[in-house]
Image: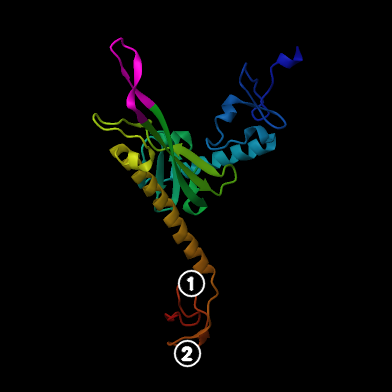
């Protein structure tokens, strides 16, 4: 039947194998081409063939940016935020060989915000009776589990957020012998060194990206601010100082 017939990828024109098709709004995409898309891109089913071709062209250009990227600072554990402080760019990657993964290279100024969400779940801690059956403590005791989710909001043509887990594995906190903890929350979490470390990592990432972003925006605003006409103290000319604050006629420094 035609329904089960093999299709061609509308990007590379190769035959798409069984279970290898990735549907587009107006065509088909093979899994090999799909792997080349940004890992943060999630709108594939709503994308046209033209949209995907444009993104793949961008991804090839991004490879050149990756090669020029000079990592000067790394934040995080498994998934890391890697900074190039000299060029004010960053990437997010969980790969040790990130240059081969072609991570999206972004400017600090593209960051619009950072949010941390701490997910808490709990399960009852049980004990065994003389017959080996699991029974509750009296009063009941609980084990609390925590996951730290960081979301970096960005102004990017192909995605608007980067979401990743800060902790390597779920952080579990058990009540110590002889004490009963009923309530969870941050007070409970603070009893764990790993919980506190994840909080510190999240804050470090947030400060690194948002503070620099604000500095960049302030510099841009200052550069666009209208210059006032002044009298040059060196040559006496009426001048509008250049971006370095120098007289346009004699080149002398003009105090503003």
Where is residue 151? Give x, y as percent.
48, 43
**Which quadrant, please, contains the C terminus?**
bottom left
Where is residue 100? Give x, y as percent.
45, 33
Where does the magenta region start and end?
A: 124-143
Q: Is residue 100 magenta?
A: no
Give the residue number, with chain letter if any, for mark 1. 243
Q: What residue appears at the point 55 percent right and 74 percent down from the top-left corner?
A: 226
The alpha-carbon separation of the residues under discs 1 and 2 comes to 19 Å
Q: Secondary structure at mark 1?
A: loop
Above-or-below relation of 119 to 203: above
Type of secondary structure dominating the magenta stretch: strand
Horizontal relation, residue 199 to residue 4: left or right: left
Q: Quadrant of residue 42?
A: top right
Where is residue 86? Give x, y as percent.
40, 53
Q: Which mark is residue 236?
A: 2
Q: Quadrant of residue 7?
A: top right
Above-or-below relation of 179 to 244: above
Q: Secondary structure at mark 2?
A: loop
Above-or-below relation of 238 to 101: below
As drawn, which residue projects farthest toward the right?
Answer: 2
Above-or-below relation of 230 to 158: below
Label 1 close to label 2 by CB (< 8 Å) = no
Horizontal relation, residue 71 to residue 222: left or right: left
How packed mark 2 is, by other alpha carbons closer than 10 Å (few <14, some 14-19, many 20 or more), is: few
């Amino acid at each position: 039947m035609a329904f089960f017939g093999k299709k061609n990828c509308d990007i590379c024109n190769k035959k798409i194998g069984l279970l290898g098709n990735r549907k587009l709004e107006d065509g088909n995409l093979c899994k090999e081409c799909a792997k080349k898309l940004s890992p943060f891109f999630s709108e594939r089913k709503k994308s046209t063939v033209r949209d995907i071709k444009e993104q793949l062209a961008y991804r090839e250009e991004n490879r050149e940016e990756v090669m020029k990227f000079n990592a000067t600072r790394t934040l995080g554990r498994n998934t890391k935020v890697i900074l190039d402080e000299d060029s004010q760019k960053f990437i997010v990657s969980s790969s040790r060989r990130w240059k081969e993964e072609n991570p999206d290279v972004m400017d600090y100024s593209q960051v619009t915000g950072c949010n941390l969400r701490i997910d808490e779940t709990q399960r009852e801690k049980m004990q065994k009776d003389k017959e080996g059956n699991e029974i509750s403590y009296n009063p009941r005791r609980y084990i609390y589990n925590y996951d730290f989710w960081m979301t970096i909001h960005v102004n990017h043509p192909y995605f608007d957020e980067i979401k990743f887990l800060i902790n390597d594995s779920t952080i579990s906190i058990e009540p110590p012998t002889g004490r009963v903890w009923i309530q969870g929350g941050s007070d409970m979490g603070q009893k764990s060194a790993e919980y506190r470390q994840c909080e510190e990592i999240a804050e470090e990432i947030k400060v690194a990206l948002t503070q620099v972003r604000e500095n960049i925006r302030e510099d841009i605003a200052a550069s666009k601010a209208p210059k006032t006409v002044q009298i040059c103290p060196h040559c006496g000319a009426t001048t509008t100082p250049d971006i370095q604050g120098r007289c346009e006629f004699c080149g002398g420094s003009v105090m503003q």
